[in-house]
Image: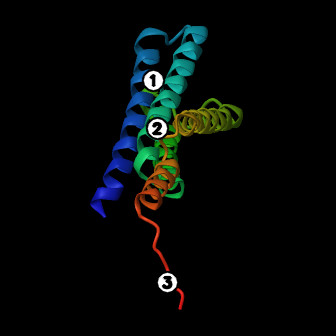
Amino acid sequence: MKRRWLPVGVLAGVLFAINVVARLIIRLGFEDDTEAADRVSLAMFAVIGLILAGVAFTWGRDRPVARWSADMAAAVLAAMLLTIFVGPFVSGVTPFSSGAGAFFAQIWLYAGFTAVGALVGYLVLVALGKDHRSESLRRYAQTRQAKPRRVIRRR
């Protein structure tokens, strides 16, 4: 059980840590400059998407799609909940201080960047033919070709 859920927890922690670092950069360096704060937030979402692309590429090599996508969805959901409800306290505000529009915009941005990042990583993996299913089919084809054909005697 630990072998399966430890990577999920670590991924959720890394995604939340990226958010905390971005919020600290905004709080300490760009508190009054909303345009720079928006750029830092966009960079944070891009980094999260790139990390998920790498994770999808890595996990997709040795795990079936249903397993790694469920694990990744659990990690993203945990990180998103932490980002939305705990992250604002790092910035010195509350989750709903900017209004419901900003709250839901953050949810949509997070979901969009994570979905696109994971999809890009998996599509690159499939295009290279290194995904779990392609490798399984390749191994099956090799074993079928390696076996000599059995001769059946008829009487």
Name the amino acid, label 2.
Phe
Q: Which amino acid does label 3 sit on?
A: Arg
Disc 1: which residue: 23
Residue in front for this viewpoint, 67 or 99: 67
Residue at 57 percent of width and 35 percent of height: 127
Element under label 2? helix
Tell me residue 22's x, y (percent).
Answer: 44, 22
- The part of the image, by quadrant, that contains residue 11 is top left
Quarter of the N terminus within the rendering: bottom left
| Eye-nearest disc, 3 or 2 | 3
Crowdedness near tag 1: few (<14), some (14–19) or many (≥20) residues, C-alpha within 10 Å: many
Q: What is the C-alpha distance between the residues marked 1 and 2?
A: 28 Å
Q: In this view, does 113 lie to the left or right of 58?
A: right
Provide the residue designation for mark 2: 57
Label 2 CA crowd tier, 10 Å (few <14, some 14–19, many 20+): many
Q: Which residue lies furthest to the right in this view?
A: 101
Residue visible at 37% across and 36% down?
Answer: 14
> What kind of element bears circle 1?
helix
Residue pointed to by mark 3: 153
* Amino acid tagged 1: Arg
Residue 149 in picture, x, y percent from top left:
47, 67
